[in-house]
Amino acid sequence: MSEFKIGQLVEPTWKIVDVYKSKHRDMVICCECTVCGHKKKFKPSEIRRGARECSNCARLENPSKYAPRDSIELCKDGFPSTTGASGELEGLKFSKLDVLVDVTSDFPPHTGTRYLCQCDCGERLIVKGYSLNNGKVRECGYCHFKHRRKVD
């Protein structure tokens, strides 16, 4: 334990706050980021080969890279696009699907925003907002399989 001292700077960003042995008798080194104050536990081998940069600082510098995929979507021009939040996509068209109405209230909470959509063929289906934004769902199942049969 003498190799690692409390208060020692490990990298330019990490300072050792505590050193102890875990219940499995492995040494644990608790460090704190000198920039943002984020705390992280390291193994001695991780510190010897060079501790990584603080993930919290990276999130603060570039939030669009680390944000959840359906909360910040950037268009090709760099401006935020719609997130799929409640009622935001009503009236829009995604490939073959027209978004008719938000039906999120019919589903359990915290399961994502859902919309009733109508395909160009007339079929109606319920689709999650982030699936529309990400392009995962572009048509109904009938059109998808009809198209696959023609290609095969």
Image: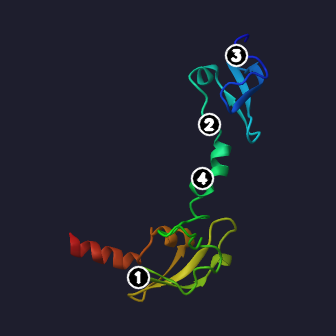
- Pinpoint residue 102: horizontal percent, then vertical percent: 62, 81
Mark nearer the N terminus (1 vs 3): 3
Q: Residues within 10 Å of mark 1 (few under 14, many from 20)?
A: some
Left/right placement of residue 105 relative to residue 141 reads right
Give the residue pinned by disc 4.
66
Mark nearer the N terminus (2 vs 3): 3
Separation of residues labelled 1 and 3 (CA atoms): 59 Å
Q: Nearer the viewer, mark 2 or mark 4?
A: 2
Mark nearer the N terminus (4 vs 3): 3
Q: Residues within 10 Å of mark 3 (few under 14, many from 20)?
A: few
How many circles with numbers are drawn on the protein?
A: 4
- Pinpoint residue 120: horizontal percent, then vertical percent: 40, 87
- Pinpoint residue 26: horizontal percent, then vertical percent: 67, 18
Separation of residues labelled 4 and 3 (CA atoms): 34 Å
Q: Is residue 100 above or below residue 72?
A: below
Give the residue pinned by disc 3.
25
Separation of residues labelled 2 and 4 (CA atoms): 15 Å
